[in-house]
Each structure stands twice: as C-alpha cells, then as structure tokens.
Image: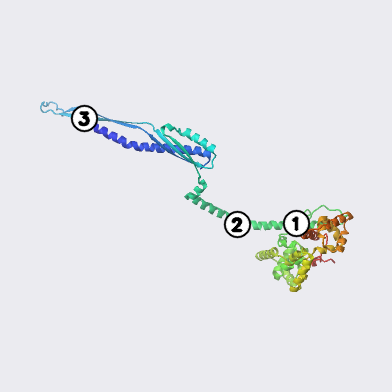
Amino acid sequence: MPQRVLRCGLRLIFLLGVPAFAIGEVEIQARLVEDCTTILDRMLGRGKAKIVIRVEGERSELRTQTELLTPMTSSGPVSLPGFTVSRTLEKTFELLQKDQDQATRTSSFAIRRLEAFVVYEDSLPRAQVDQARTVLSDLLRINPERGDALTLVPVAMVPPWRTALASEEGVRLLAVLAAAAAALLGAILASHFLLMRPGRRLLEQWVERLAAAQGAAPAAAELIAPGMPRLGLEPSALGAASPPLLAQRFSFLESRAPSELADVLKDEGPEDLALLFAYLAAANPTHSSLAFATLPHELKLDVSQRMLALKFADPERLALLEERVRSRVELMVQGPDRLGSIYSHLPPEQRSALLADIAARDPEAPSKLSRAMVPFESLLELAPEDLRVLLPSAPREDWAAALKGLPAARVDDLLGELPEKTRLLVQDAMAAPLPTARVLAARARILAQAQALARQGRLSLGARPPEAELL
C-alpha cells in the first residue's frame, strides 16, 4: 500500500512539473524582451530595433508524501454491572489509524541557455550599434561557454507610422481625422460667409469714409484766406453729428469718374436709381451731382419723381442693388481705354497703320480711341509750363533714349526747356545707337510718369473729360 501511494505521488510531480517549466520560460522571456526593448528605444530610437529572446532552463520541484499507519486494539462491549462475561465470549477488534503528511519544495528557475536575435535599421551608425551590442551583452549576461548567442542583423525596416496606418486602429484613426478636418473646414467656411465677409465689407466702408473725410479737410482748408487765423476746432469738437449710417452705402462709387458711372447705371430702373442717388448724395453730394448730370433728361425726371416720394428703403432690395452695382464696377474693363493705352506705347508708324485699318472696319473706332490714347509724341506738344513739370520727373538717360527717331524740330523745342548743361548731356547720349526695345521701354516709363502727374492735376494731357471742362 505505501509503495502504491508513493508511485502516484511521483507521477503527479512529473505531470505538474512540465507546465511549470514552460510558464517560467515564457515569463522570463517576456520580461527580458520588455527590458531590452526599452533600452534599445532609448539608445537607437523608438521603433529602430526589435529583439526576440529564447530561454532554455529548468526548475526542480520535489514533493514528498508520507503515510503513518498505527495499529490499535479495542475490546468488546463493556460488561454490565453485576454481570460477568466469560472469557470464551470476549472478542477483540484490531483497528488501523492512518496519518498522512505531504511536503513540496520548489527551487528557482535556472537558465541553461539564452539566445537573443536583434534586427535594427540599416541606416544607424556602426558605433551606435556596437554600443547597443555591448549593453545588451552585459544586460543578458551572454556566456558563449554555455551556448548563449547574441545576433544583430541590419535590415531596411518599415517606418512605424506606415505600420500603424496599415492596422485596423490606424484606418479608424484616419477616418476620425478626416471627419474632424471636414467638420473644421465646414466651420471655417461657415464663419467666413457668416462673419468675415460682412465684417470685411464694414471695415472697407469705414476706411473709405475715413479716407473721404481726411481728403475733404485740406480742400476746406484751402478756402481760408492766408491771413485768416484758424479757430483750431474740428467739427467733432464743436458738437457736429457724425455722418449717418446712410453714407456707408455705395461708397465704392466715389472713386469712379462720373462718365464711368453712366455706363454702370444705364441698365438700372428709375426706382433703383432713386434709391442709389439717395444714398450716394448722403456720402458725397458733389460726386452724386456729377453722376446725375450724365443721365438722359427723361431719366432724370423719372428719378427725381421717385426720390420726391421716397421715404423708407427696402433692406433686401437695397442689398441686391448694391451687390449688383458692385459686381459691375469690379468687372468693368473699359476696353477702349485699355486699347488706347496699348496703342499709346506702339511705334508711330505701326500705330498709324493700325488706326487706318481699324477705321476701315469701324468708323467710330478712332474717336473712341482718341479719348484714351496718349502717344509719346503728344508730350512734345505740351505747354511750356507742363513741360517744366514733366522734364525733371524722369532721368536724362530715359529722355535721351525716348527722343531718338522723333522730328528734330520738336526735340529741340523740348530740350530748350532744359538747362544748357543738361541739354548737352542729353544730346551727347542721343548720338549713341540704341536697340528699339530700349527706346520703347524709356518712352513707356516717361509716359507712365506723365499720366501719374496728370492724375495729380499737375499737368494736362489730351482732351479733358466732360466733368473737368473749365468755365
């Protein structure tokens, strides 16, 4: 009986011992991989190296089981008082008392052999890899005598971000980011259309009003006689009311000439024109009067009749009218003016040939172009006071190049307005041959400077527009 119990105990030890060894190896491998991965990430960079560790070892476990059998003797039933049992009837019972004792002793896991395999990014420096090899060898206590091995192999590793994106979580993250970006873009567009465009328009209108107010102050100051003292008080300091909100509408028309406004407003009806001139007159009465004067007589009467009956403005109709007029002004090209500017920079013979050919196709074309065309030769016909303003505005090198090929009599008249020393320098520079492209470029620069001076009112070029006629 004791031998059978001992045999069963040894069999149980064998069955339970093998899984214990396997569990011990897995736990140790996982801990070593975790520690080594942390060190490699610190030394080589996150995701730059991966390590695989295999451990072979053993753990002894001893279990002992002891059974103690103690024989016991028990007599038969106790005789009753006053009654004696004979010896022949007395029976004896033998009992066995069984005691069991079991003990288990397990030793620690002992590593018999260790193999470590490391793959790292092939772009890493050799010295850095050797340093990591030394640290891993010391950490894992690599001992070649017992069969341990540490192998490092360089490979072209896939970037961590690409691996993360290829996973299920990466695809989910990309979908979330795309949805968030779409929502953010929608919010930005909505805020732009709901807040930014109206706010920018109000800011532009405020800047235009401020510029118009600053531009009107010097004009009023010029009316004061030189000997008259200034009061030193602005209209706002005297308690004057600020311009009403009415003046903010159609302020973009103030920078356009009245003749241009006639083309912009020719398709509008009397009711819309009455609304427009009511707001434009509040912003700039002078400009609105000049624009009103360009309308046909019958249309003036219709607009006047509508304005006499005008009390309140329809906000929706007003907004549509302003947007419609603004789009026309922004898209206005003025083709004759642009073509006249192009013809002005062409050589005289080429310009004359083009004018003759286009007049054969459209007899009204020369008259349309003459108002916008300012050729360089027309500068030679300027009044002496205008020439004295224009000549110092361009360098003498440009004048020497621009005057080549022009009639000598007109050139002498123009150079006669220069000082003698400057005139001689220009004439000497004109003697040298120059490419045609350089001559045309110099003429274009001088012509642009003349047009800028004309816009400033410092000289007069060509015919005056109807609103600028002198009385």
Dot 1: element: helix
- Using residue 129 as the reference point, say whether residue 446 is left or right of it: right
Identify the residue shown where x is 27% and y is 35%.
Answer: 8
First in sequence, mark 3 or 1: give its number: 3
Would you say the residues marked 3 and 1 are in contact, meaning their CB atoms lie under 8 Å apart?
A: no
Label 3 CA crowd tier, 10 Å (few <14, some 14–19, many 20+): few
Q: Amino acid at mark 2?
A: Leu
Dot 2: element: helix
Q: Amino acid at mark 3?
A: Leu
For marks 3 and 1, give the CA distance: 123 Å
Q: Which residue is mark 2?
A: 189
First in sequence, mark 1 or 2: give its number: 2
Identify the residue shown where x is 58% and y is 55%.
Answer: 185
Q: Amino acid at mark 1?
A: Ala
Identify the residue shown where x is 53% and y is 39%.
Answer: 44
Which label sits on residue 96? 3
Q: Which residue is mark 1?
A: 211
Q: Quadrant of residue 216?
A: bottom right
> Which of the pair 137/60 is nearer the observer?
137
Instruction: Inspect this view and state whether residue 310 appears.
Output: no
Q: Is residue 139 above or below residue 304?
A: above
For marks 1 and 2, give the CA distance: 31 Å
Would you say the residues marked 1 and 2 are in contact, meaning their CB atoms lie under 8 Å apart?
A: no
Q: Where is residue 212? Give x, y as percent.
A: 76, 58
Identify the residue shown where x is 33% and y is 37%.
Answer: 16
